[in-house]
Amino acid sequence: MKLVPIAFLLLLSGFFYCCSTQHKSAGKTNKALLDTIHRNWSHAATQYKHMTTILPEGRFPKTFYEQTGKLETSNSGWWCSGFYPGSLLYLYEQTKDAKLLAEANRMLQLLENEKVNTTTHDLGFMMFCSFGNANRLNPSAAYKDILLTSARSLSTRFNPIVGAIKSWDGKPNEFLVIIDNMMNLELLFWATRETGDSSFYKIAVTHAETTIKNHFRPDYSSYHVINYNSASGAVQEKRTAQGFANESAWARGQAWGLYGYTVMYRETKDTRYLNQANKIAQFLLGHPNFPADHIPFWDFNDPAIPETKRDASAAAIMASALLELSSYNDDANAASFYKAAESIITTLSSNKYKAAAGTNGGFLLKHSVGHLPNNTEVDVPLTYADYYFIEAMKRYQEMAKH
Ligand code: GLY
């Protein structure tokens, strides 16, 4: 596709997203939930300001262990490093609390160097959730430069034979792609919109096409990992890394796919992506193992259900995606997706999931699962659970206004 038409398309799609987020909510606005969200903002500001006091200099929060009172942290290279500054910026937007902005700016400085990191596919998470929000709130040449450099670094991992961005570096003949990688494409769409250079757009669309072809089962659940042959592009293996089994539906992976194809539709207006996102949502909401409160078990196919862990992070990602997706639907889907998102936000706002002020290391939510098969980060707070919970509440609030 030529550069000018693509740029024009993207301009239109940006306009569409801007307008679409102003869609009237697909259900009757729930005043009680809006009040809850309003209270959640001040609770969240208190929690995150508490976190600033216990976070060691130069480190990023990862999780917190209540039993030991230990805040686990990472350096800027961990895939989650963008969520904390991103959450601070979302919270600043809601509260106008200058301390939150100052902390966000401090963290952005620590994160900036990752723009040249070509060893990870997670640059979309790391840089768009952080600098993307910073640039949205306060556009600047410096932020744009950081984001464009990040998009270029991410693009170096694209292999045209496989038709995908490499997620994990494996053995020489392996090219590993995980469903999570759909979340990194938003940065590339932004880069084409910003520069008019269609190569970022083409990489994103090609990756999404390859993923539709190989990651999904006929019921629209998805595999976690596809192992491609790096020389031929042939699929060598379909498996899991963080799920219960190769053929199971790992909850967060399903959430990444749902969010990823919702963004694909927003950015391209290709109704095949809308259909894909709708089918994923229908798979989730219609699943016999999906609990009535809409907080999924960590894997839809864990045979121990209901005696196994819930994953608040998957729920939060789903809520945010379902709200946006509801705005693109004009039939029964819209109401069903919107109601499910309301239910998730309501449950996550209850004492069962929302931490009491001053506890949980400053994180908002309890009960997420990072990597259960590895026995790491099981039933703990996680930065991305908070980030997408905050985003879902912001989206709900904005949709209710229109
Ligand atoms: N991207 C890693 C995860 O979802 O755990």
Image (tube, rainbow, N blue to C red):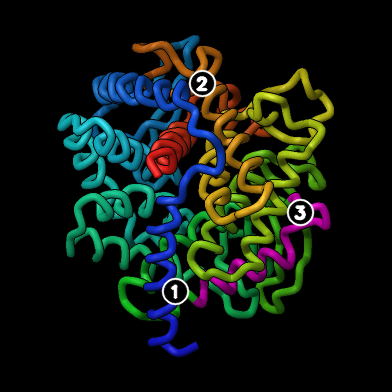
Q: Amino acid at mark 3?
A: Tyr
Residue ID at (34%, 12%): 358
Q: Position of residue 249 (x, y in %)?
A: 75, 43
Which span is picked out in magenta?
202-221
**Helix, strand or loop for disc 3:** loop
Under mark 1, the amino acid is Phe
Ligand 1 within 8 Å of disc 3? The answer is no
Question: How far apart, in angstroms, are the residues tagged by discs 3 and 2?
Answer: 29 Å
Residue 274's spot in the image, x, y percent?
62, 61
In the image: residue 330, left or right of residue 99:
right
Q: CA distance from mark 1 to mark 3?
A: 27 Å
Image quadrant containing the C terminus? top left
In the image, residue 308 above or below residue 140: above
Say the numbered circle drawn on residue 222: none
Give the number of the mark in front: 1 or 3.
3
- Tell me where residue 41 sits by quadrant: top left
The x, y position of residue 266, in whole percent, is 50, 62
Magenta span: predominant SS is helix
The residue at which mark 3 appears reads as 220
Mark found first going from the N terminus, 2 or 1? 1
Image point (44%, 65%), residue name: 154
Report which residue position mark 1 lands on: 200
Label 3 neighbourhood size at 10 Å, few (<14), some (14-19), many (20+)?
many
The answer to whether residue 314 shows anywhere in this view is no
Q: Which mark is residue 366?
A: 2
Please name the amino acid that badge 2 sits on: Lys
Q: Position of residue 148 (x, y in %)?
A: 31, 67
The tag earlier along the polypeptide, 3 or 2, is 3
